[in-house]
Image (cartoon, helix red, strand yellow):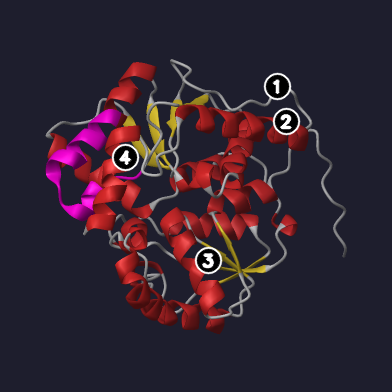
């Protein structure tokens, strides 16, 4: 479809599917860095750009700098609290690969190879994939096949990394900071296709006071309705939002106030579902929930009532 191809073309031409200029990207990150420093009360809290030899090169869904910048702040706060050695690339940060949906192998190879090349250029040890279902599947699992090469670096999702930080005590979290009832939407490409479904539950049980599951859940959870690249194709809007009714009913049945999901594609679809079906819920990424739960070293823990 033409609208899907335009998204692929933007990624090929500009390095990201939203067509964000490098200067606009840098300006956004510098603003977010100032906000981070204010929040954690530390002028040394930075969002590093293009730094070589770091343990982690972090990626983003371009919807973050374009529409949801606070999710970048959330992950930056997590990295700060964990004392992580990390960087963002200003050249290749886009975790998505819409050629995966269009089926154009050559264009899919171009996009994936750019990520591989940037990892090598920055000499990073681990590529951490942002909260994006198809981004995870297309790069972690599919790219080695259509590039016909094994990665010389580790590839991991931010979901796995967040769970690792909590499990190893690298960040301290307090579930009392997230009081509202939270439910979880499992992205198809992360859970059903990628086998990642326990980690997000571990994170939520550590970071929120009240958690409730959808029915069905995990690998059996219903699609949000925005998968398969449909969000980039306006001609499928009516069908997409019709399918969303099933997910809306699932959410209603939980009674939750917050819907957490580790996928920006799902976030966008769920925001539209929230409005269309008048669910009156909040949609959050896992990074945002973890960031809200973090207890910094210079922060006093709240006094808990008996």
Tell me which numbered mark, 1 or 4, is placed earlier along the sequence: 4
How far apart marks 1 and 3 lie (CA) works out to 34 Å
Q: Which residues are magenta?
A: 96-114
Mark 2 or 4: in front is 4
Q: Tell me if mark 4 has few (under 14), some (14-19) or many (20+) residues whose alpha carbon lies within 10 angstroms of its own.
A: many
Q: Residue at position x 39%, y 29% from top?
A: 126
Relative to residue 173, is residue 11 drawn left or right?
A: left
Q: Tell me if mark 1 has few (under 14), some (14-19) or many (20+) residues whose alpha carbon lies within 10 angstroms of its own.
A: few
Let me know if residue 106 is in the magenta part: yes
From the image, tell me which residue sits under label 1.
Answer: 44
Q: Position of residue 201 (x, y in %)?
A: 50, 60
How far apart marks 3 and 2 lie (CA) works out to 29 Å
From the image, tell me which residue sits under label 4.
Answer: 11
From the image, tell me which residue sits under label 2.
Answer: 37
Q: Are marks 1 and 4 in contact (CB under 8 Å)?
A: no
* Image quadrant where one finds the N terminus: bottom left
Q: Residue at position x 56%, y 79% from top?
A: 254
How far apart marks 2 and 4 lie (CA) works out to 31 Å
Tell me which numbered mark, 3 or 4, is placed earlier along the sequence: 4
How far apart marks 2 and 1 lie (CA) works out to 7 Å
Q: Are marks 2 and 1 in contact (CB under 8 Å)?
A: yes
Per the image, label 2 sits on a secondary structure element best described as helix
* Image quadrant where one finds the C terminus: bottom right
Q: Are marks 3 and 4 in contact (CB under 8 Å)?
A: no
Which disc number belongs to residue 222?
A: none
Q: Position of residue 73 (x, y in %)?
A: 62, 40
């Amino acid at each position: 479809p033409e609208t899907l191809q335009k998204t692929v073309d933007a990624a090929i031409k500009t390095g990201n599917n939203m067509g964000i200029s490098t200067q606009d990207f840098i300006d956004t990150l510098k603003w977010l860095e100032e906000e981070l420093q204010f929040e954690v009360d530390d002028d040394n809290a930075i969002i590093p750009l293009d730094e070589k030899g770091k343990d982690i090169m972090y990626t983003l869904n371009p919807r973050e700098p374009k529409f949801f910048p606070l999710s970048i702040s959330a992950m930056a706060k997590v990295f700060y609290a964990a004392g992580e050695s990390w960087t963002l690339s200003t050249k290749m940060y886009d975790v998505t690969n819409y050629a995966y949906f269009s089926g154009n192998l050559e264009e899919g190879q171009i996009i994936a190879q750019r990520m591989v090349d940037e990892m090598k250029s920055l000499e990073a040890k681990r590529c951490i994939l942002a909260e994006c279902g198809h981004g995870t599947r297309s790069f972690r699992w599919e790219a080695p096949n259509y590039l016909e090469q094994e990665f010389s670096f580790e590839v991991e999702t931010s979901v796995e990394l967040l769970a690792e930080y909590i499990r190893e005590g690298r960040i301290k979290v307090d579930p009392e900071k997230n009081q509202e009832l939270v439910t979880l939407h499992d992205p198809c490409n992360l859970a059903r296709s990628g086998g990642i479904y326990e980690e997000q539950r571990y994170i939520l049980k550590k970071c929120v006071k009240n958690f409730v599951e959808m029915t069905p859940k995990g690998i059996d959870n219903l699609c949000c309705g925005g998968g398969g690249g449909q969000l980039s194709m306006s001609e499928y809007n009516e069908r997409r939002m019709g399918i969303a009714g099933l997910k809306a009913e699932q959410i209603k049945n939980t009674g939750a106030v917050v819907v957490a999901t580790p996928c920006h594609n799902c976030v966008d679809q769920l925001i539209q579902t929230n409005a269309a079906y008048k669910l009156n819920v909040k949609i959050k990424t896992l990074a945002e929930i973890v960031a809200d739960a973090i207890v910094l070293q210079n922060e006093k823990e709240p006094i808990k009532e008996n």
